[in-house]
Image (cartoon, rainbow, N blue to C red):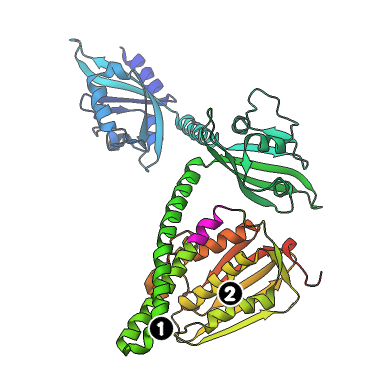
C-alpha cells in the first residue's frame, strides 16, 4: 500500500463512526481508533499494550457470564465470534453493550497475528430488550389475576383472559353479561348476594369457592372489589380483581383442622382438672395445711389460664369457619363497655388499675353480634392489663363518632410496641419479645381475633405506639352500623 493510500485509510479508520480496535493473541490492545478513545474514555497512550480485560471488558457481565473466559475463547476460536454481543465498561465505570464483528488477521504463513474488532454501541437497544423481557415476565406472572370492569348494575364492560377462564367464558362474548349469576353458577361466595351487591363500601374482599367434583379440583379465588365514584359520589364503575389463593386457603384449613383437633382433645382433660380442683377447694381444703392449700390454689389458677388459652384457640377456629355477621343486635356502647370490662378490673389484680371511659354521646350504639363485640373489647383491655410493665396500670377507652366512622380506642401506659412489630402482632401466634412486655402468657391469637372480627364488619383496626409511653388500639366501624338507642 503506498503512503497516500495508507494515510487515507488511516484517516478513514480514525474518523469512522464505529469502534475499531485490534488486539494481539494475548488480548492486549494494539490499535484503538479515535471513536473508540472518545467512547470508552481512554487516550491511545493509556490503552495501547493493556489487556482488554480490566480496561474495556469487565470480568463478568450483569448476568454473571464469565467474560474473561469469553475473551480467551475469542483468541483461540475467533470463527465462533464473527458476530458477538457482550457487555463492556467505560473508563468512568459505565456499563455498555457493544455489537462486535471480530475478524482474525493472519501473517504470510497463515498464522493468526491479531483480531480486528469493529463495534457499535447497542446499549439503548439492549436496555429496551431487557425492559421488554421484564415486562413480558411481569405480564406472564400477572396473567393469573383476573380483572373485570362492570357497570353499576354489574354488567361486564371489560374482562381479561384470566377472568374469562375463571368464569368459563373463553368461547363466549362476555361484554354485557351480568356477573352476579356467573359468580353463583360456578362458585360459592363467602358472603351473601346482598352483601356482594352492596356498594356502600369502597373496598370489599371475599372468597369464591368451587367445590371439588369429578371433573374439577377445589378452587379458592380471592376477590378484591373497588367501587369507582365520580365527584358527585355516584357509582360509575366496579373494578374487580380475582386471584387464585387455593394453596393458601388449603394450608389455612389444614392448620384449623389441626388446631381444632388439639383444642378439643385438650378441653376434656382440663375440664376434669378444673372440676377436681374445685371439689378439693370446696370440700377438703379446711383439712389441708397451708402448703397443700397453696398447691391447690396454683392448680386452679393455672387451669383457668389454660382453659382461657384453649377458649381463645377455639374462638379463632370458629371465626374462620362461620359467617360472623349473621346475628346482629344494637349494642349501647357506653353502658355495655362498662359492663364487660368490670369483671376484668375486679379479677385477680397484681397491681392497681386506673380505668376511665369517655363517651360523649351516651345514646350511641352499634349493630353487630354482641359475642364478637365482647371478644374484641375484652381482648384489647386484657392485653393492656397483662402486658403492662408499670407499677400502676392506666387504661382509657374512648368512644367517638364522625362522618365516616364510629371509633373505639383503648389506650394504655404500657411498654409500647416496637415499630417493626406493629404489623406482625396481627398475625396468628406472634408475640412481642418478653423484654418489651414482661409477659409471655398466651399464644398470640387475641389481636388476630380482633382484626378478623372487625374486618368481617367492614371496619379496621389501627395501632399507635411509642416505646416507654404506651399503646393505643383503635377500632373503626363504618357509620352505617350505627344504631341510635330508642330507634
Marks 1, 2: nearer the viewer: 1
What residue sits 55% from the left and 67% below the top? 463
Residue 108 x/y as whole percent: 20, 10
Residue 434 position in % (x across, y down) = 38, 72
Give the residue number, with chain letter if any, for mark 1: 283
- On the question of residue 115 being in view, the answer is yes
Q: Position of residue 313 (x, y in %)?
A: 47, 61
Left or right of 375 on screen, residue 250:
left
How would you classify the magenta stretch by its main secondary structure? helix
316 within the magenta span? yes
The percent coordinates of residue 362 (x first, y second) are 74, 78
Mark 2 crowdedness (10 Å alpha carbons): few <14, some 14-19, many ≥20? many
**Residue 418 visible in the picture:** no
Q: Quadrant of residue 73?
A: top left
Residue at left 81%, top 72%? 486
What residue is pinned by disc 2?
A: 410
Query: Where 431 falls versus 80 (above or below)?
Result: below
Q: Which comes before the other along the chain, label 1 or label 2?
A: 1
Q: In this picture, which residue range is highlighted in magenta? A: 314-322
Q: Magenta includes 459?
A: no
Quadrant containing the N terminus in the rendered view: top left
Q: Secondary structure at mark 2?
A: strand
Q: Quadrant of residue 34?
A: top left
Amino acid at each position: 500500500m503506498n503512503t497516500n493510500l495508507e494515510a487515507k485509510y488511516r484517516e478513514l479508520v480514525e474518523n469512522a463512526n464505529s469502534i475499531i480496535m485490534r488486539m494481539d493473541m494475548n488480548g492486549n490492545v494494539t490499535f484503538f481508533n479515535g471513536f473508540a478513545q472518545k467512547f470508552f474514555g481512554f487516550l491511545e497512550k493509556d490503552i495501547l499494550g493493556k489487556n482488554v480485560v480490566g480496561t474495556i471488558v469487565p470480568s463478568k457481565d450483569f448476568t454473571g457470564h464469565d467474560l474473561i473466559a469469553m475473551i480467551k475463547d475469542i483468541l483461540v476460536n475467533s470463527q465462533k465470534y464473527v458476530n458477538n454481543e457482550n457487555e463492556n465498561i467505560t473508563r468512568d465505570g459505565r456499563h455498555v453493550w457493544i455489537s462486535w464483528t471480530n475478524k482474525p488477521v493472519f501473517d504470510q504463513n497463515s498464522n493468526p497475528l491479531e483480531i480486528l474488532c469493529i463495534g457499535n454501541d447497542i446499549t439503548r437497544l439492549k436496555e429496551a430488550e431487557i425492559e421488554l423481557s421484564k415486562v413480558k415476565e411481569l405480564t406472564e406472572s400477572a396473567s393469573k389475576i383476573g380483572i373485570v370492569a362492570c357497570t353499576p348494575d354489574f354488567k361486564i364492560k371489560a374482562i381479561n383472559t384470566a377472568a374469562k377462564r375463571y368464569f368459563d367464558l373463553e368461547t363466549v362474548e362476555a361484554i354485557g353479561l351480568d356477573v352476579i349469576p356467573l359468580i353463583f353458577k360456578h362458585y360459592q361466595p363467602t358472603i351473601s348476594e346482598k352483601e356482594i351487591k352492596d356498594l356502600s363500601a369502597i373496598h370489599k374482599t371475599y372468597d369464591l369457592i368451587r367445590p371439588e367434583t369429578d371433573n374439577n379440583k377445589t378452587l379458592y379465588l380471592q376477590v378484591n372489589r373497588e367501587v369507582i365514584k365520580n365527584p358527585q359520589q355516584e357509582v360509575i364503575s366496579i373494578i374487580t380483581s380475582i386471584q387464585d389463593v387455593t394453596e393458601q386457603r388449603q394450608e389455612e384449613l389444614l392448620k384449623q383442622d389441626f388446631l381444632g383437633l388439639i383444642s378439643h382433645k385438650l378441653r376434656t382433660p382440663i375440664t376434669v382438672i378444673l372440676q377436681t380442683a374445685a371439689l378439693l377447694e370446696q370440700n377438703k381444703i379446711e383439712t389441708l395445711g397451708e402448703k397443700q392449700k397453696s398447691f391447690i390454689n396454683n392448680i386452679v389458677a393455672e387451669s383457668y389460664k389454660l382453659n382461657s388459652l384453649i377458649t381463645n384457640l377455639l374462638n379463632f377456629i370458629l371465626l374462620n369457619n362461620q359467617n360472623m355477621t349473621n346475628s346482629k343486635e344494637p349494642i349501647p356502647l357506653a353502658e355495655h363497655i362498662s359492663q364487660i370490662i368490670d369483671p376484668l378490673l375486679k379479677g385477680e389484680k397484681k397491681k392497681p388499675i386506673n380505668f376511665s371511659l369517655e363517651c360523649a354521646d351516651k345514646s350511641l350504639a352499634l349493630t353487630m353480634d354482641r359475642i364478637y363485640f365482647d371478644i374484641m373489647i375484652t381482648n384489647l383491655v386484657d392485653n393492656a392489663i397483662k402486658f403492662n410493665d408499670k407499677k400502676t396500670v392506666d387504661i382509657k377507652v374512648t368512644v367517638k363518632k364522625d362522618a365516616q366512622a364510629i371509633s373505639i380506642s383503648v389506650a394504655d401506659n404500657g411498654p409500647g410496641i416496637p415499630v417493626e412489630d406493629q404489623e406482625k402482632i396481627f398475625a396468628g401466634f406472634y408475640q412481642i419479645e418478653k423484654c418489651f412486655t414482661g409477659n409471655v402468657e398466651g399464644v398470640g391469637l387475641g389481636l388476630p381475633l380482633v382484626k378478623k372480627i372487625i374486618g368481617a364488619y367492614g371496619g379496621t383496626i389501627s395501632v399507635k405506639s411509642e416505646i416507654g409511653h404506651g399503646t393505643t388500639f383503635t377500632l373503626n366501624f363504618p357509620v352505617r352500623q350505627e344504631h341510635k338507642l330508642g330507634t
